Amino acid sequence: MNRARVIAVCLAASLLVAGCGRGSGRAGSAGGDAFSFAIKSDPGLLDPAQVQNTTTYTALSLAYDTLVNIGSDGRVVSGLAEKWDVKASSVTFTLRRNITCADGSPVRASTIAANVAHITDPATKSPAYGVVVPEGLTAKADDVTGTVTLSTPEPFAFILQSTRYLFMVCGKGLKDRSLLKSGTSGSGPFQLTSARPNQSYTFTRRPTYTWGPGGATASDPAMPGSVVLQVVGSESTAANLLLSHQLNAAQFAGPDRARVTDVPGITTSVQPNGTQEFFFHQGTGHPGHSRAVRTALLQAVDLHDLGAIATGGTGLRPTGLVMQPRPCPGDTVGGHLPAYDPHAAEAALEAAGWHRSGDGVRRKDGKKLTLRMIYGTSGGETMAAAAEYLADAWKKAGVDVKLRALSDAAYGEIETVTQDWDVDWAPLGVTLPTQLLGALSGPFTPDGGNFAHLTNTTYDRLTAQASTLPDTAGCAQWSGSESALFDSGDLIPVVDKTLSTAAHNATFRITAGLFDPTSIRMTGAGR
């Protein structure tokens, strides 16, 4: 799996969520209640330049600021920067005054520039560089005026929004990155004060913090005095802890969500959490090379039923490839996929020259219509059931289907190196349309990231136009480019996974794996 795909999948783990409830469970801490939240794995290395998983992003978002933030409606709001001027290949930020690092040192424009220089330095080998941080990004700072300009060699449409994942290290950690192996050095509203690997991480509130999203502060007495991230690998265990009021909040992707739903004192919310989709390999010699065959194969499948099976009935109809809240709102999927029509599928395959033989399998020029489908075992039982359902639908249409379940370790080798597949169930989760370009266009693997060998000229034309337009000015082109992919059957969005967040005695917001720390409020007895 290429690096862009790895980062994209990592980002598809948490969406906008909020919950509140009443109860008696309150964990005390100096300066206020403690907000306890379950994370599924240990964050590991805490250096923001080396983040490779969503859990680490979640943890670091408590202690680090970014230049801007994204509101619940997808719009950009202030962060370290109070205003900005966006152009096609640059954005100039004016920083707020009197920002301080957790160690008391000032945060200046040169602090921002130093972070950019570090993450883009080839020696750093940052996994985010070229994915969530644009390639060739440079920074020019002026501490006197409090401005910093980020530039790219070529126009980069979402250069402003891309800074949402650029955590700014300051103070001692900026000079000695070794301090970030197990500690934080940021300007955020919380500071890591206790780290117990594989057990818990405690972040203590900084009450003097005044530069949060839209100017939010950390002075509200209802904010927790600390945030405790408890490492809980099992969703069943997390549900037990929540129900016994030993946790304030946890997120559920599996069946344990039902145990905490409609429970007195616990409020749940459900939001999309990345799209489940599959690709046809369009290389020469693959059945998916033919658009007529792709369309017929889609007509043979009830995508609604397929999505329900893939998510155990907890999914939502997909409306686009970018996770919500999107910079470009709207539905790019509706009306752009063939309707379920098995009879039309049969007729289309016949017209394309694929005729049934005595064994029921279609052949053309003596060659079987064979589809080798790969999918990941990490998707669990529902993914396996979905693959079987898809195979059964295509077998009824006369296709010889061969399923292959792969471990995460083996997946990348088959997908991008040996290319021994015709259909690839490859979930993606991205926060900006630009993050898809390397996987959906450009050079084919192994020379590039275009692993399905897509050649959609409309997508290429519209994304090229959109890439030259700053901020959201190119949204019409970005939306049209996605629809063009679906019209051609290049990739098929089946269903949006969902994430259920349950909360007890607290409300909060977390978007695409990042906390809005200043949104956390304790709502239990005595509040």
Image (spheres, helix red, strand yellow):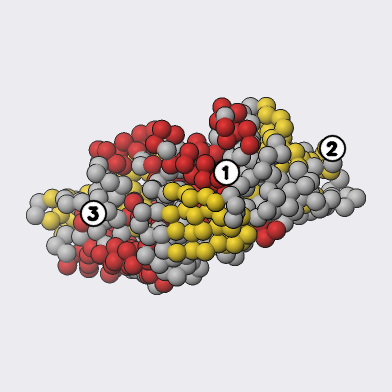
Which residue has dot 1 on it? 111
Q: N-terminal of the two: label 2 or label 1?
A: 2
Q: Position of residue 49 (x, y in %)?
A: 51, 38
Rounded to the nearest angstrom, the CA distance separating label 2 from label 1 is: 31 Å
Q: N-terminal of the two: label 2 or label 3?
A: 2
Mark 1 vs 3: CB contact within 8 A = no
Q: Secondary structure at mark 2?
A: loop
Q: Is residue 191 left or right of residue 157?
A: right
Q: Label 3 is placed on what type of residue?
A: Gln
Q: Position of residue 127 (x, y in %)?
A: 44, 39
Name the mark on residue 282. Answer: 3
Establish if 85 lies above or below 179.
Answer: below
Q: Label 1 is placed on what type of residue?
A: Thr
Label 3 neighbour load within 10 Å: few <14, some 14-19, many 20+: many
Establish if 478 lies above or below 140.
Answer: below
Label 2 neighbour load within 10 Å: few <14, some 14-19, many 20+: few
Instruction: Give the image quarter of residue 484.
Output: bottom left
Instruction: Give the image quarter of residue 483.
Output: bottom left
Rounded to the nearest angstrom, the CA distance separating label 2 from label 3 is: 60 Å
Viewer-nearest of labels 1 and 3? 1
Name the mark on residue 30. Answer: 2
Residue situated in front as seen by the camera: 515 or 182: 182
